[in-house]
Image: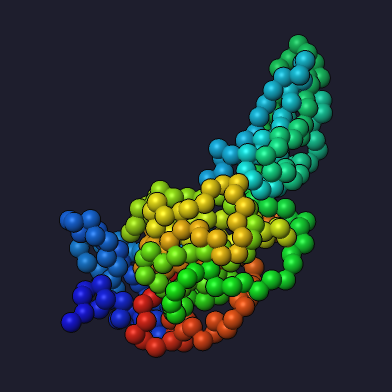
Amino acid sequence: MMSNPARFLFLFSLLLATQPAMALTIYKYVDANGVTTYTDKAAPGAKVFVFRDKMVEHLEQQVKLQTSKSGSADVLSVNNELYAPVQVELALNGVSNAIGAPSSPVRVVIPPRQNVRLVSLTAADPRQPLRYTPKLRYALGDPDSVQVPYLYPLPWQGGPFRMSQGPNGKFSHFGPKSRYAIDIAMPEGTPIIAARSGVVVKIENGQSSGGGAEPSGNFVRVLHDDGTMSVYLHLTQGSVLVHEGQRVAVGTPLGRSGNTGNSSGPHLHFVVQRNVGLSLESIPYDFNQPVNSLPDFAGGNGPAAGKPAAN
């Protein structure tokens, strides 16, 4: 006899296969024992579960605008503590009594682990205050990097597993950061491995299952030599085995799959991204073996007995 979660997952996949995914309303609630349940019924205390394209990575502690004095001048620089280049844009608003203020925002790429001076301002009238309000925008990566064709091996061990949502999936893969992502439903604890060599530039390891503060849950982001980045999301809490700045090879263990963040079930969300100009966007990629044979439940192309999971 099916448990309630299994029964819902079975029903959920039937619905996905027979109607547009965007028309399906999913509810989420946490019972007295702290167990999170997803259902198509508006149970008491349940809230509508909304899938959003929010891969939030807090960089504000590693990409910092700094202001220092050099004689009578205000020097504005950006310190990049990440193991990846960062494109920044500095705009100055409300400028008055200033010499050296740029007429348009300054855009530069800050190399990994470096501090770059962007603007130096002095007062036109030393007797009056120098006024300005800086605004900094930034995005990981170098938009001028040249992508190299690459066939990705599967980023997990074990299986075979089933695709719960493919590229351009209407369920949640419709935003710029995840348009070409795939979700693979798999048991929690499945070994996740690097599908391409590179440098680990960002990790999260402290999010709990069935929720957590961040939509991405626990993840590993790897910067490849051509400037693209692969991201492995929704990993089990405490399972991440690599650290920022570490060089990884193909097959290096990264962590274990889980159900953390904005996730409807245990799965791996795998996406490849690049900086397209102060913005990270997902890009198309290919595996080194056919994956069309994996049913895409969110697209309605697989048998109904599958276990849906998406983000």
Q: Where is residue 31 drawn, in percent x and y?
A: 20, 59
- Left or right relative to 52: residue 33: left
Q: Where is residue 296 drawn, in percent x and y?
A: 47, 81
Q: Residue furthest top?
A: 127
Does 179 sit above or below residue 65? Answer: below
Q: Foreground: 206 or 66?
A: 206
Q: Residue at x 49, y 56 (%)?
A: 219
Q: Quadrant of the C terminus?
A: bottom left
- Left or right relative to 229: residue 237: left
Q: Residue at x 46, y 53 (%)?
A: 240
Report whether residue 123 is seen. Answer: yes
- Left or right relative to 165: residue 199: right
Number of disc labels:
0
Q: Foreground: 189 or 46?
A: 189
User: Residue 77 falls in which quadrant of the image?
Assistant: top right
Q: Residue at x 71, y 58 (%)?
A: 225
Report whether residue 20 is seen. Answer: no
